[in-house]
Image: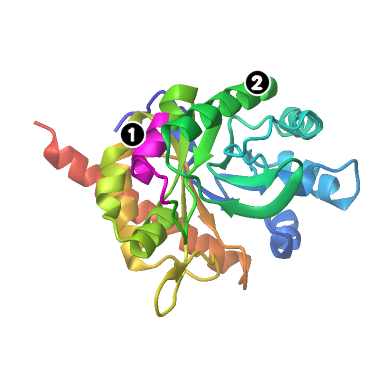
Amino acid sequence: MPANRFNGHTDYGIGLGLRVPHYGHILEKKPLVGWFEIISETFMVDGGRPLEVLDEILAQYRVVQHGVSLYLGSADRPDRAHLKRLKALVKRTRTPWLSDHLCWGSVDGTYSHDLLPMPYTHAAARRTAEKIRQVRDCLEVPLCVENVSSYAAFHQSEMTEWEFLTEVVERADCGILLDVNNIYVSSRNHDFDPYAYLDGIPHHRVGQMHIAGHTRFEKYLLDTHDHPVLDPVWKLYTHAIRRCGVTATLLEWDDRIPSFDEVHAEALKANAYIAEARQAHAVARP
């Protein structure tokens, strides 16, 4: 299961999100962690405690940046001031790649602060791919786009979500941050086969994966990131590894955050599923 063009960091293994409740434990205990993912916007500041903590983390750990406000699917042109601050952080962290979401969330400079789903049209794919290229060229670092969880769909859509994702990344020549939990959540909300989604994307473009917990309500699933990963998501993750290869994997836990050790133990469960996928791959080889 070799590395692909967009996944040259298979040695990164399992990572954790860097969250405020765990700062003290990490800085004092220095636990063995493959890497930390940071939310870029948290550290796009001029100074203060966030950057002090970040510099202490950078002295000991590898860090990868993940963003929530590029809104690559919005019709607005990239915000140059935002990109300037983001690029300064890229240089500070020396992140080997950077990710953000395949979504929209702003109109004429007004921001919703939400990750809104795209209309799956060829015109939207062309505009989004062009914006991704502009952002990547400005930041001068490889870019992966993440599939979001969704709770509504557009009647104008001309293709499936995975066909849209494929068209965008092929046109932009960028990577994919494959959020396996988001695929599962959306598949139940919109009644599609999550395995067809995984089989239908360009596997050689997957450079990172996300796993997380979700919450089941009466009529829909919600991507809550507030408890352990559920069994259907682990099964889907195993299939993703089989299809895409061993890939840097990040456990998201962003609400009702337990102790560092509990979050870390949940993340490390991924190693068992990676081993299962590797064994299946070995058996399948002629």
Amino acid type of the residue tagged 2 in the rendering:
Glu
Task: Return the mark for residue 145.
Answer: none
Specify few, some or many for label 2: CA neighbours under 10 Å numbering under 14, 14-19, or 20 or more: few
Residue at 34% in and 41% down: 159
| SS state under label 2 | loop
Is 25 situated left or right of 270 in this image? right
The residue sitting at the bottom extreme is 218
The picture places residue 195, in percent across and down from the top left corner, at: 26, 50
Q: Is residue 89 visible?
A: yes
Residue at 45% in and 57% down: 268
- Is 144 above or below relative to 223? above
The picture places residue 43, in percent across and down from the top left corner, at: 78, 45
Q: Quadrant of the C terminus?
A: top left
Q: Nearer the viewer, residue 17 or 105?
A: 105
Protein image colouring: rainbow
The residue sitting at the front extreme is 156
The picture places residue 235, in percent across and down from the top left corner, at: 29, 58
Mark 1 in CB contact with mark 2 (< 8 angstroms): no
Q: From the image, tell me which residue sits under label 2.
A: 140
> What range is drawn magenta here?
155-167
Is 186 situated left or right of 65 in this image? left
Q: Earlier in the sequence, mark 1 or mark 2?
A: 2
> Looking at the rendering, which quadrant does residue 261 occupy?
bottom right
Q: Quadrant of the N terminus?
A: top left
Specify few, some or many for label 1: CA neighbours under 10 Å numbering under 14, 14-19, or 20 or more: many
Residue at 33% in and 67% down: 231
Q: From the image, tell me which residue sits under label 1.
A: 203
| SS state under label 1 | helix
Q: Is residue 200 magenta?
A: no
- Is 259 above or below relative to 86? below
Q: Is residue 9 visible?
A: no
Q: Nearer the viewer, residue 176 or 130?
A: 130
